[in-house]
Amino acid sequence: MHNSSIKLREINKEISNKVKELNLTNYNPKIIAVSKTFSAEKIRPLIDVGHMDFGENKVQEAAEKWQELKTNDTKLHLIGRLQTNKVKIAVKLFDFIHSLDNEKLARKLSDEQKKINKNIKIFIQVNFGEENQKAGINPDNVTSFYNYCTKNLNLNIIGTMCIPPFDQNPEPFFKQLQKINKTLNLNELSMGMSADYLLAVKCGSTFLRIGSKIFGERS
């Protein structure tokens, strides 16, 4: 068995133990194997053992790499920032977009989806740390942004996503996002990465974005 498949199995076991420990029923968070910068050779062993959800940061890199890898069963998640000039390619390639963070992008996504009659599953990225370098909608504006995206643009918003400030305890941010999600009556939560996914499980995340813990450190 390939190294990454073994690691994935270990992480799955850890998560199911955590779910049992928390006494949660009907809760089965999905792992997005973040394959950005890793080659097709590194990714294929995971597909071979039946893993289906993969995350990429850059549209161009994903387009080149996944042309040969993508099957009807694999689900591709864009977890990096999406620029409007890359939306056309992104809409064709990805099944999920985790980083919707402004109205201009929302309009562009709506336009391009209509052209090819596709209904991508989208997360609104929320920026809690009010960090200027980070994308995301201010928590106070999420409800009005959500209403605009769903009512005016007919976008399929399935949940919210966040990347907490890396120098702080992520738990309060995860709890805050969980609360926003409940207010909007959304089912999916995209939070938790290699360093804090068990904490994200505790806060009800449904999609965990795990890269280095599966594939090893990026060169």
Image (cartoon, rainbow, N blue to C red):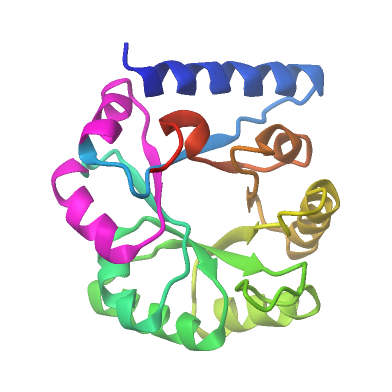
Q: How many marks?
A: 0
Q: Which residues are magenta?
A: 41-69
Residue 195 vs residue 107, the one in the foreground: 195
> In the visual, does 91 lie left or right of 165?
left
> In the visual, does 68 lie left or right of 66?
left
> In the visual, does 18 lie left or right of 67?
right
Write the residue at 77% across / 26% down.
Answer: 24
Write the residue at 64% across / 19% down.
Answer: 14
Asked whether 2 falls inside the magenta stretch, the response is: no
Write the residue at 71% across / 35% down.
Answer: 201
Q: Residue furthest left?
A: 68
The quadrant holding residue 115 is bottom left
The quadrant holding residue 147 is bottom right
Q: Position of residue 142 (x, y in %)?
A: 72, 75
Q: Position of residue 68 (x, y in %)?
A: 13, 45
Q: Residue furthest top?
A: 1
Asked whether 57 falls inside the magenta stretch, the response is: yes
Q: Position of residue 91 (x, y in %)?
A: 31, 68
Write the residue at 48% across / 17% down.
Answer: 9
- Quick check: 72 above or below 77? above
Q: Residue furthest right?
A: 172
Q: Quadrant of the C terminus?
A: top left
- Quick check: 9 above or below 105? above
Q: Quadrant of the N terminus?
A: top left
> In the visual, does 43 lie left or right of 163?
left
Q: Position of residue 7 (x, y in %)?
A: 47, 20
